[in-house]
Amino acid sequence: MATDRPDPGDFLELAQRMLRELFGNPPGENDPWAAATRPARELHHEPSAEQRRENLTFALATRAVEALEDLALNVAAIRQRLERTDAQGEGRRPDGDDATGQ
């Protein structure tokens, strides 16, 4: 089976790099991730519309990366099944031996 298709892991790496760039450390904040995930009751005030928008964007981006990871796993499983099917159709086992054990 041809393996000239992109590796699903490349897509995940690109998505993670884009998220890191998008949510990079803003100047003046030590830990933006902790601030973004801190419950509103700990802040002692209602988050601003901008903070809520950033939190929602981060949550959606996180879910998108998780979905991409699931998709990559599914693609890898399908690819393995197709390779096994192709190997069996050619009279070979997935390990490369033919049906006679050679």
Image: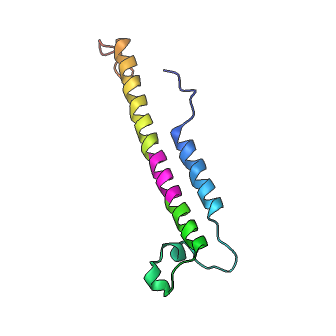
- Asked whether the viewer can see residue 97, the reply is no
Seen from the viewer's position, the closer of residues 19 and 82 is 19
Residue lying furthest left? 100
Q: Position of residue 102 (x, y in %)?
A: 34, 15
On the picture, is 24 further left or further right than 57? Answer: right
Above or below, 68 against 85 in this view is below
What secondary structure do most residues of the magenta stretch adopt?
A: helix
The x, y position of residue 71, in whole percent, is 45, 41
Q: Nearer the viewer, residue 72 or 101?
A: 72
**Residue under the point 56% across and 29% down:** 5
Residue drawn at x 56%, y 43% is 11
Picture quadrant where residue 74 is located:
top left
**Magenta part of the protein: which range?**
60-69
> Percent position (x, y) of residue 10?
57, 43
91 vs 48, left or right, is left
Magenta span includes 56: no
Q: Check residue 68 for magenta coloring.
A: yes
Compared to 5, does 59 lie above or below? below
